[in-house]
Structures are given as C-alpha cells and as structure tokens.
C-alpha cells in the first residue's frame, strides 16, 4: 500500500499460489500460474501433479499438454512424456515445439530414427523455426560431422516451403557464433541468412 517492495520467500510464494488455486480449483488459470512457478523453480514432481490435474479437468489447450510433457521429460518419465507430447502435437498442429520435445524424448530413449523424424516434422510444421533447424544441424553434426551437417541442412533448405526462409542459415550461424574461433564461419552464415531473407 505504501509503495515499498515486499520480499517473499519461495516456499511462501508457492504455498500462497497453491492456496489460491485450492480456493477455486475450477479456475484452471490459477493452476497454470502455480504450475509454471513450480517449473520455474524446478519443482518438477509437484508441477507434474498440477499440470496433470489441469489436463484432467479439461485443459484442452495444447500448452497444458506441452507443459505436462516437458515436465515428464525432465523427470525422465519417457513413456508418459512421449504419450503426452503426442497429445500436444495433435492439439497444436501448427506448433513445432511438441515435435521438438518429442525429439528429446527419442534421444533419451536412444531412438535415432524417431529423433530425426520428430525434428523433420517440426521443420515441416514451421519452416521458420530456428530452434528446429538448430536441433537438426546439431543432430547431424554429432552423427556425421560438420561438413555432412552443413550439406544436410542445405539440402533440406530448398523446396517450396523451406526455400523461402532464412532460418536454416540463422541456426548454423548461431551454432558457430558460440565460439570465438568460429567467428568467420558465423559471419559467412549470417550473410547467407541476410541474402536469403
């Protein structure tokens, strides 16, 4: 009331948010706020419980399913995460992130074919998704080396949909920009991205 900031402890914050949700459990937004704070502070077990309740109570937003799947992935509940993320994929047909997180599930399961297929699906859904192109480049780089990864991205970066986006080049540029000794490579790919754009 007097305009001074209040410091609140984490446990008090979470307890307050949980009470707020319990006061009206039919208000799914209260649950979402609580669950997202739990995620933020890496309280994954409790976050999974809250997101599962939201989904069970009719949380038909794909974001609820996606958040539940990501939480299950963090907990290494891979079969549950796979099912949940497939549900998110069915709801969010134009969003690449359920597919990208599915790729992470398949990576954890050591299913290379599934991982690759999920990443390609993310690119197909949203050719402008730099994260999807970055994941694809990293995947190819780890498996076949830099030259083969560049070739794979360039081959995929043509065609009706992908041929119009600079995202593949931005992704490669981002990969090389992480280390000072690759600065020239990063600049080369940034120029290609600008040309494509």
Image: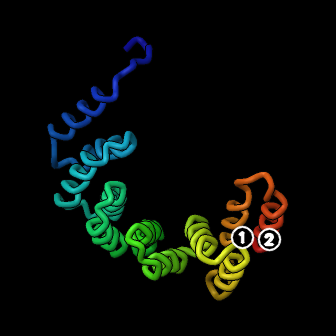
Occupied quadrant, residue 157? bottom right
Pointer 2 residue? 192
Secondary structure beneath disc 2? helix
**Residue 85 image offset from top left, x and y in percent:** 34, 68
In screen coordinates, is 125 left or right of 40? Answer: right
Instruction: Identify the residue position indicated by label 1 in the image.
Output: 169
The residue positioned farthest toward the bottom in the image shown? 159
Q: If the image is split into quadrants, where does the C terminus sit?
A: bottom right
Q: Position of residue 17 (x, y in %)?
A: 26, 35
Question: Looking at the rendering, in which quadrant would you find the N terminus?
Answer: top left
Q: Position of residue 38 (x, y in %)?
A: 32, 42
Asked if the residue at tag 2 contacts the one at tag 1, i.e. Cβ–Cβ closer than 8 Å, the answer is yes
Asked whether residue 165 appears in the rendered view, the answer is no
Q: Is residue 195 shown to the viewer in this render?
A: yes
**Residue at position x 65%, y 88% from top?**
159
Please, which colouring scheme is shown? rainbow
Q: Residues within 10 Å of mark 2 (few under 14, many from 20)?
A: some
Q: Determine whether, in the image, residue 194 is placed left or right of residue 102.
A: right
- Extreme-top residue of the structure: 2
- For marks 1 and 2, the one nearer the N-term is 1
Residue found at x 43% / y 79%: 114
Which of these two is toward me, 37 or 103?
103
Residue 20 horizontal/vertical position (percent) = 21, 35
């Amino acid at each position: 009331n007097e305009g001074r900031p209040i410091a609140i402890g984490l446990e008090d914050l979470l307890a307050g948010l949980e009470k707020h949700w319990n006061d009206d459990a039919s208000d799914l937004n209260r649950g979402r706020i609580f669950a997202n704070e739990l995620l933020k502070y890496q309280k994954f077990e409790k976050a999974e419980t809250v997101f599962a309740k939201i989904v069970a109570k009719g949380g038909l937003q794909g974001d609820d399913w996606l958040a539940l799947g990501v939480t299950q992935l963090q907990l290494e509940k891979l079969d549950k995460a796979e099912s949940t993320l497939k549900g998110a994929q069915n709801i969010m047909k134009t969003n690449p992130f359920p597919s990208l997180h599915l790729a992470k599930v398949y990576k954890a399961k050591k299913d290379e074919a599934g991982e690759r297929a999920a990443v390609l699906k993310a690119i197909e859904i949203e050719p402008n998704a730099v994260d999807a192109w970055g994941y694809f480049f990293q995947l190819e780089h780890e498996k076949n080396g830099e030259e083969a990864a560049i070739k794979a991205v360039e081959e995929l970066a043509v065609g009706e949909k992908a041929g119009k986006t600079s995202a593949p080049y931005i992704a490669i540029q981002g990969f090389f920009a992480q280390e000072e000794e690759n600065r020239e490579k990063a600049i080369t790919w940034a120029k290609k991205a600008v040309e494509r754009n």
